[in-house]
Amino acid sequence: MTDPIADLLIRIKNAGQRGHESVSVPASKLRAEILRVLKAEGFISHYEKEKEEAETHPIFRIRLRYVGPGQPVIAGMRRISKPGRRVYVGKRDIPRVMAGMGIAILSTSKGLMTDQESRRTGLGGEVLCHVW
């Protein structure tokens, strides 16, 4: 797999559009940090690390949140920095997503954080994705 972050985002987006209660993704430290940010911001309800007996690699079981019947909290997700084209921003150029209704997840020297946290701490970094 060349882009594990894009894989995580598209699995969550597709599961939400189909109305699934949960989705499974392979586990990694970076995915765990992205899921931590999504949970803290209220886009997903819960995630936990599991190791299935048939599987050799641990997985994350992600429980999705819905606003109403069949309407997921996550309306859209977009991968910004890709393996072929990295996107870095300074502290003055941190993007606002949907006029503040969404979040941008940045990878900074202090770990992954949202655009609001990054502005508050005065750190720029790599813009991984936008979620709204």
Image (cartoon, rainbow, N blue to C red):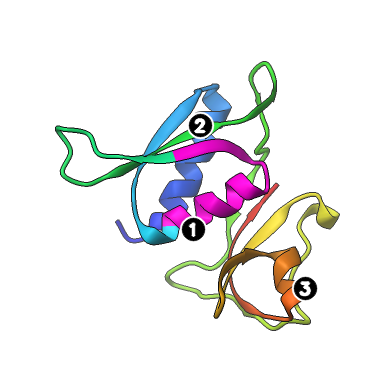
* 51 horizontally vs 65: left or right: left
Q: Amino acid at mark 1?
A: Glu
Marks 1 and 3 sit apart, C-alpha to C-alpha, by 19 Å
Counting labels gives: 3
Mark 1 and mark 2 in contact? Answer it, CB < 8 Å: no
Residue for badge 2: 63
Figure quadrant of the N terminus: bottom left
Q: Position of residue 46 (x, y in %)?
A: 53, 36
In the displayed structure, 74 sits above or below 83; it is above
User: In the current view of this chain or complex, which residue is farthest to the right?
Assistant: 99
Q: Is residue 3 visible?
A: no
Q: Quadrant of residue 17?
A: top right
Q: Position of residue 14 (x, y in %)?
A: 50, 34
Q: Position of residue 125 (x, y in %)?
A: 60, 78
* 42 horizontally vs 46: left or right: right
The magenta span reads: 31-47
Residue for badge 3: 120
Decide which of 119, 93 is in the foreground and name it.
Answer: 119
In terms of secondary structure, where does tag 3 sit?
helix
Residue for badge 1: 33
In terms of secondary structure, where does tag 1 sit?
helix
Residue at x 55%, y 80% (from the top left corner): 109
Q: Position of residue 103 (x, y in %)?
A: 71, 56
Q: Quadrant of residue 55?
A: top left
Q: Amino acid at mark 3?
A: Arg
Marks 1 and 2 sit apart, C-alpha to C-alpha, by 16 Å
Q: Is residue 67 visible?
A: yes
Residue 38 in the magenta stretch? The answer is yes
